[in-house]
């Protein structure tokens, strides 16, 4: 490790409805909308709570969760009951923790998305609630139900994935279960859900320490443990490698996406999104790309504080909360990231991290900037934890560096 950087402190848990996390700006609380959907009324409530009990700052996470900041300890303790009463959480803390489930955001509104996607997601969600033994899964262990369509199969990523497969006969089995580098044969919904739950149980039984999404070979061991048949499929096919970046603006039919820059919005902005949703079908659907899908609209919405155009450079920029929200950050990386976005070459992406953990973007980026007391360490085609190739002391120096990048260097 370079002597210029201090080692980051790993908190060791993932915040949830019943597990607030202390940050530099107060307690952080998180809610997981069922099946990644909330009504306009629920969104208005979250906006009110964010202002009344927090600092009004809200984040949309890459797992489809909503995060509120700046709570006192007392307000953080009262938060779960308010969410449960609003239909945004389970009364049983263990059941709530097991529901790390993402669902295709266009399920039910995209004709190209598998018609059984919502049915499959509901069945899996009910199974997770009923299987108390799965409380032993790691906090970040997740599931997804991926129906394909406009967002093609493989766009969602999780430790255990139920993916729709194209079939010329709609009544034939059409769901495969993907875990790590292994995949089941196509199955009907009920069988696929049971297979997913069995794989999760096997993970607990074996005492695995590496999640399948991080160590792909774990999936093969879990399939062997359950006795389920495996078929070969390429990692790129199953995990969506090189998929096109989801965009803002018009998606399909009457569905439009609005993306929060860096995943952040204010309570006032969330209210505006809820008001637009009321002009359509009344739902706000969470995406794993810090966005919301609003359906039933006649044109692209204009929402102050949200990205609604697909060519906006801010869609290719990532940054953590930075200072003053995080005590480990060496600077206000969000401010700098947004200021640098206009100078980013086409198709390149930029990650600005407050420390070497790289919380906002664990993967590699065209350019990664890691904050330090005297400027930014620059990593090209790498991650925040990689050694920098140079140190740039001022944002003006970074801007010049970005402008000098070859157009093909993406």
Image: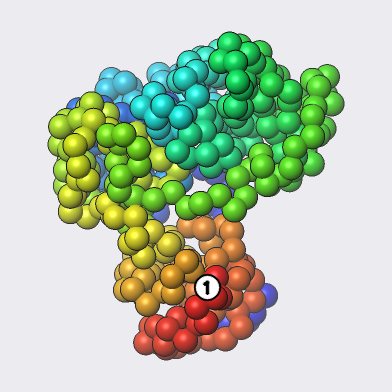
Q: Which residue is mark 1?
A: 367
Q: Nearer the viewer, residue 131 or 162?
A: 162
The residue at the point 61 percent across, 83 percent down is: 389
The residue at the point 62 percent across, 50 percent down is: 241
Q: Nearer the viewer, residue 307 or 379?
A: 307
Instruction: Describe the element under mark 1 as helix, strand or loop.
Output: strand
Can residue 374 be seen at all in this image of the molecule?
A: no
- Residue 202 drawn at (x, y percent): 75, 24
Locate residue 162 relative to residue 115 in the image: left or right: right
- Residue 364 drawn at (x, y percent): 59, 63
- Residue 162 drawn at (x, y percent): 60, 27
Colour scheme used in the picture?
A: rainbow
Vertical placement of residue 404 versus 364, above or below: below
Q: Quadrant of the C terminus?
A: bottom right
The residue at the point 27 percent across, 52 percent down is: 308
Asked which quadrant contains residue 250, the reply is top left
The residue at the point 53 percent across, 62 percent down is: 358
Can residue 298 be seen at all in this image of the molecule?
A: yes
Pointer 1 local density, CA inside 10 Å: few below 14, some 14–19, many at least 20: many
Vertical placement of residue 158 versus 7, above or below: above
- Outermost residue toward the front in this view: 168
Q: Quadrant of the N terminus?
A: bottom right
């Amino acid at each position: 490790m370079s002597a210029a950087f201090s080692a980051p402190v790993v908190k060791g848990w993932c915040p949830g409805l019943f597990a607030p996390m202390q940050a530099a700006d107060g307690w952080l609380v998180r809610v997981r909308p069922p099946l990644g959907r909330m009504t306009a009324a629920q969104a208005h409530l979250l906006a009110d709570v964010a202002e009344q009990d927090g600092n009004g700052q809200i984040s949309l996470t890459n797992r489809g969760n909503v995060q509120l900041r700046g709570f006192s300890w007392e307000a953080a303790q009262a938060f779960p009951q308010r969410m449960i009463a609003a239909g945004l959480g389970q009364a049983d803390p263990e059941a709530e923790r097991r529901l790390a489930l993402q669902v295709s955001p266009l399920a039910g509104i995209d004709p190209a998305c598998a018609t059984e996607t919502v049915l499959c997601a509901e069945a899996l969600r009910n199974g997770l609630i009923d299987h108390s033994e799965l409380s032993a899964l790691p906090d970040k262990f997740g599931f997804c139900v991926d129906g394909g369509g406009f967002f093609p199969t493989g766009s969602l990523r999780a430790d255990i994935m139920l993916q729709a497969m194209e079939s010329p006969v709609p009544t034939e089995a059409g769901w495969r279960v993907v875990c790590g580098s292994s995949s089941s044969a196509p199955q009907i919904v009920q069988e696929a859900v049971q297979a997913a739950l069995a794989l999760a149980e096997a993970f607990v039984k074996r005492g695995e320490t590496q999640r399948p999404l991080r160590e792909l070979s774990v999936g093969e061991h879990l399939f062997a443990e359950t006795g389920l048949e495996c078929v070969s499929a390429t990692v790129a096919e199953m995990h969506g490698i090189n998929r096109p970046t989801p965009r803002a603006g018009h998606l399909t039919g009457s569905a439009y996406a609005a993306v929060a820059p860096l995943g952040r919005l204010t309570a006032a902005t969330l209210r505006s999104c809820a008001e637009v949703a009321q002009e359509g079908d009344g739902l706000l659907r969470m995406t794993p790309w810090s966005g919301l899908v609003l359906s039933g609209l006649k044109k692209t919405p204009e929402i102050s504080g949200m990205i609604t155009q697909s060519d906006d450079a801010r869609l290719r920029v990532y940054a953590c909360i930075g200072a003053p929200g995080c005590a480990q950050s060496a600077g206000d990386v969000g401010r700098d990231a947004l200021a640098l976005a206009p100078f980013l070459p086409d198709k390149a992406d930029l990650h600005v991290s407050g420390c070497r953990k790289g919380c906002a973007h664990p993967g590699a980026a065209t350019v990664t900037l890691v904050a330090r007391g005297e400027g930014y360490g620059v990593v090209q085609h790498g991650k925040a934890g990689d050694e920098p190739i140079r140190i740039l002391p001022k944002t003006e120096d970074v801007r010049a560096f970005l402008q000098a990048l070859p157009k093909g260097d993406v």
